[in-house]
Amino acid sequence: MFNYGPLAVVALLGAAGASSALASDTPTTDTAETEATRQIDLEVAEKIFRKSCRACHGNKAQGAASYPSLSDKDPAYITERLERYRAGEKIGPNSILMIQHAKKLSDDDIASLSVYVTTAFE
Amino acid sequence: MLHSRFSEPLPLAASLLVGAALFGAPTLAQSGMNTTNLQSEVVLDGLDNPWDMAFLDDGTMLFTEKCSGLSVRMPDGTVNKLYGVGAKEGYPANGEDLFCEGQAGMMGVAFDPGFADNRRIYVYSTSNMSDPHTNRLMRFTVNEDFTAVADRTDIIDDVPYKMAASNHPFGGPGAHNGGRVRFGPDGALWLTTGDTHNGQVPQSPTMMGSKVIRVDTDGAAHPENAPPEGFDKRTYTFGHRNIQGIAFHPDTGAAITAEHGPWHSDEITILKNGGNAGWDPRPNMAGREDCPDDYCGYSPNQEGGMNRYERAAFMPMTDFDTYPDAMPPVWNNNGWSQGTSSAAFLQGDAWGDWNGAMVVGIMGIGFGGTPIGQRIDVIHFNEDVTDVEDVTEMTLPMETGRFRSVVMGPDGSLYTSIDEGTIYKLTPGN
């Protein structure tokens, strides 16, 4: 298990998030504190990836068929999309698939996956 | 893992128990040769969704990349780009009308059996030349040094294309184009097509989606096609969903399709000239009422997982109640839909007991409790080639992927492409 400290989590999630839709809203102190306490577990993320993501998005999250690449995105972008899918929002033609997978994810799962898919295959 | 040949619908509780037992069990002994001695080799990597391949006897390999175009790999390993999709850079010529969207783009490819004399090849791709757009089967000639194609002739220009998004899973434009192009042992050119998420297409006598098309190399109907009266004479079979696999039995010559099911029931079907595959996703048919955007293909409950046999009862892949004479599938993937795509027959003594068996590439999809299932299955037919006798999963010597295409090479190896961008060569023996 890879437990990043709060600073690392904030850095990874926020590193490239300045231009993302999520980051366009200035986070409150509470939000920042919540993000800072997320536990990044890359082993858990890998299991989720292999079970729920890999078959469509490719073995290296490079994208395949009509499923987009994840590895070239920012962690903040992945987090934002997963949170919106988890909330049941439809974004694009494969939303039904994504909503089903995302609704099972915890905040920690989303944080871990966001780091994993954007860093594991570099 | 052994798969039963065919599964009848079971009550919910029973089917869940059976499913748990099947997928919780350790790997069972495999019939025939020990597949662990398969060797794999990366032939090409870093491709853009490689969709199909075709070979000459010397190993020259045409291959398509869905959003990029047509290329050829020469026997010495050199790759020459030949014909690009749209404005894709790096190709000596482009089809400005060709484009990719969702599942659509450049798909199947075949060499003419008389290539040595006529230099002809055939490529299936999505095109915006017509409005609404269509999928087209194009014929080209290739120059002597395999560096350019010329003489494009669209011998089929009217296979439907899905123009707009709809309220369905995978509901974007470009869905369900079929796409495999093969020459049969009869010398005819065969093309498989899909339903484009349009409920009217599969049983339509004139819309050329959801069909197996058999034509000559000018696109004219084969004179022995026997579709029902009023059908387009290019039709060999109809009522399909989205066929991406077709292969011909090496002994009988029978055309056999592998087809992607609607969240249940991938199917292998031994085709009958003029036959109906029994897919009819129209609303207000067979006890169904209205469905999202007039297409019942994912109903009921298209937004969540549910028992696959309940799905099959509501929206059967082969509807025998409505079409009692429909062609019966000989395999239904234990009732699962896992992205069944291409098909080919293994040939050569090196394959041992698998020599003459059919292989099917399965791309995998994990949704609503369906096991992902990325694999290549080996399908053994009975002696009369009327039924499936046994199914064995290949033990692959490399990581699995979305197995879009399986093609026998002239060297006796099986070549397979995965959407992730790799073409592998699988060779039996040490």
Image (cartoon, grey):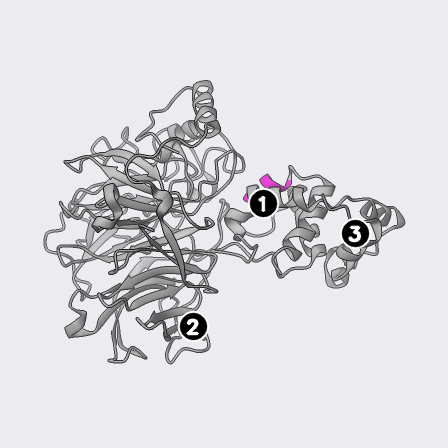
> Which range of residues does the magenta coloring cover?
A95-102
Residue sitting at 39 percent across and 71 percent down?
B97
Residue situated in front as seen by the camera: B94 or B34: B34
Residue B416 pos. (x, y %)? 36, 55
Crowding around mark 1 (Cα neighbors within 10 Å: few <14, some 14 to 19, many 20+) is: many
Q: Residues within 10 Å of mark 3 (few under 14, many from 20)?
A: many
Residue B32 placement (x, y as % from top left): 28, 37
Which residue position holds label 2? B86
Task: Indicate which disc residue A9 carries.
Answer: 3
Q: In the figure, is residue B403 to the left or right of B120?
A: right
Q: CA distance from mark 1 to mark 2?
A: 30 Å
For label 2, the SS is loop
* A96 is within the stretch colored magenta: yes
Is residue B244 inside the magenta stretch? no
Mark 2 belongs to which amino acid? Gly
Q: Is residue A67 visible?
A: yes
Which residue is disc 1 drawn over? Answer: A98
| Label 2 packing within 10 angstroms: few (<14), some (14-19), many (20+) | some
**Mark 3 or 1, nearer chain start:** 3
Q: Is residue B225 left or right of residue A118?
A: left
Q: Chain of mark 2?
A: B
Q: CA distance from mark 3 to mark 1?
A: 24 Å
Task: State which chain disc 1 sits on.
Answer: A
Quadrant location, the N terminus of chain B:
top left
* Rendered residue at 47%/19% (across/down): B13
Q: Quadrant of residue B334?
A: top left
Q: Are marks 2 and 3 on the same chain?
A: no
